[in-house]
Amino acid sequence: MFLGIDIGTSGVKAVALDETGAVAGQGVAALSVQRPHPGWSEQDPDAWWLATTAAVQAIDPAVRRSIRGIGLAGQMHGATLLGDDDRPLRPAILWNDGRSEAECEALEAAVPALRTITGNIAMPGFTAPKLLWVRAHEPALFDRVRTVLLPKDYVRLRMTGDKASDLSDAAGTLWVDVAQRAWSDAVLAATGLTEAAMPKLFEGSEITGTLRPEVAELWGMPAVPVVAGGGDNAAGAAGVGVVNDGDALLSLGTSGVIFVATDQFRPNPARAVHAFCHCLPGMWHQMSVHLSAASCIDWVARLTGAAGAADLFARAEASGPGSGEELFLPYLSGERTPHNDARVRGAFLGLDHDTDSGRLAQTVLEGVAFALADGLDALRDAGTQVAQLSVIGGGARSDYWGRIIAAAFQVPLVYLKGGEVGPALGAARLAQLAVDGGEAAAVCAAPPVARRIDPDPALVDRLSHRKALFRQAYPRISSKKGS
């Protein structure tokens, strides 16, 4: 058995796989996000640890006793700042925190080659600008910083005592020379840090340490090897076989991501496309990233009093595509691809007296689909061709939403058995690859296809005009001068 643990934003998921790749057990524990000021997003690192233990302990004890290796996945970019005693100095600043916009400009000015080195525009979501913000606004605390870890790697520290990270997650800090797969001294120096404050870097399928005896006892398993793992998107890709050049997936989690595996480093920062290391040696990937995807579903469900996501999808389907004049711009936490606009916020347009919960639900599903389509077009502008997309994440449960997205993209969507398990599945497979060996393409093979959704020509026609209106609306709410 192999265990994958995904430290997400809304919760921690633990998944056990047997040697055939079948899911043998799962556990989930919820997390909450704190937003002490507009545009801020924080979590208590110790909450990750408590949720991780709860998720693991929810798996059947007999399964836990059979675990032979553990892989980690997690939300990217979070700045977890530790002092001399390896304890957090403040709440972690998360991936969807927008406070460091000014620091992004300062970092680009300080390192003119930043985009060449990192393959990315400096955005507030990345880790490096967050440290500049802390240095400017919390200087006494900054002086006490001895180690900076990503969320999953703080959990790793609690598990093994090792300060380690994988290259796919570390590349999202903006401190990595992505082509060379190593820390960049120049970018670290621009944020007042050195490599001494960074964890050791590993490929995702390498062992970083061993579970501490006291943790093994707490979790009811042997003191097994712990594997580097990956950032949530890279691990999710490994879980569904997106490991070869040109393979692509759509992740419908809290955020929305289109991920394309590449066998070379192919940056395109001009359109806010991310280019990072993959969690497998010798591979990279491109991503379009949208800060609010399934989180918009949860938000509008609360807004309308729906019983949950399933109820909301049912209300939307009852209304039907294009059922009203409403438009939704899903920028609840700002946006990355293609706008790189941390301060833009979401909006409903075209509301009238006939607007009801079903029409609001429908327009939210469409708005997220249109934003994701903008990201796909940015990848296409970078020369990336996408023939089909494998769908993972919680949003993969709705075929109705899938039909809307396929029509907005004009690309087929493939739903894989177990695809909704998400990054924890890939983390477990990386553990299997590290412990048992083998070829990545075989161990991280795509699961069987459960169903396929092809673009419906009638729905493509019905939504095309609304997609055009959606694209015309962004400049009206943009936070950027002159837009």
Image (spheres, rainbow, N blue to C red):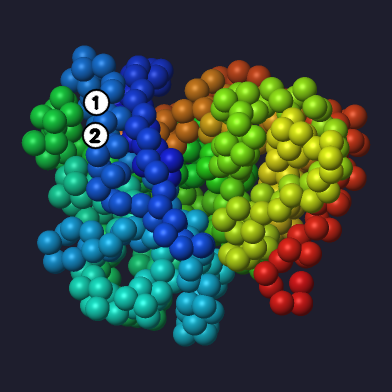
- State whether residue 430 appears in this view: no
Which residue shows up at 57% across the image and 52% down it?
A: 291
Q: Where is residue 383 in the image (x, y as percent from the top left)?
A: 72, 56
Residue at 58% x, 64% y is 342
In the displayed structure, does residue 358 sit left or right of residue 180? right
Judge whether 398 appears above or below 265 on screen.
Answer: above
Q: Nearer the viewer, residue 286 or 262?
A: 286
Cα separation between marks 1 and 2:
6 Å
Percent position (x, y) of residue 410?
80, 38
Residue 178 in the image: above or below residue 22: below
Disc 1 marks which residue? 57
Tag 1 and tag 2, C-beta contact below 8 Å:
yes
Q: Where is residue 194 in the image (x, y as percent from the top left)?
A: 28, 75
**Front in this rendered view, residue 132 or 166:** 132
Quarter holding residue 415: top right
* Residue type, label 2: Thr
Disc number for residue 53:
2
Quick one: 82 or 122, which is closer to the camera?
82
Q: In this view, does 454 lie above or below 297?
A: above
| The C terminus: image quadrant | bottom right
Secondary structure of the residue carrying tag 1 is helix
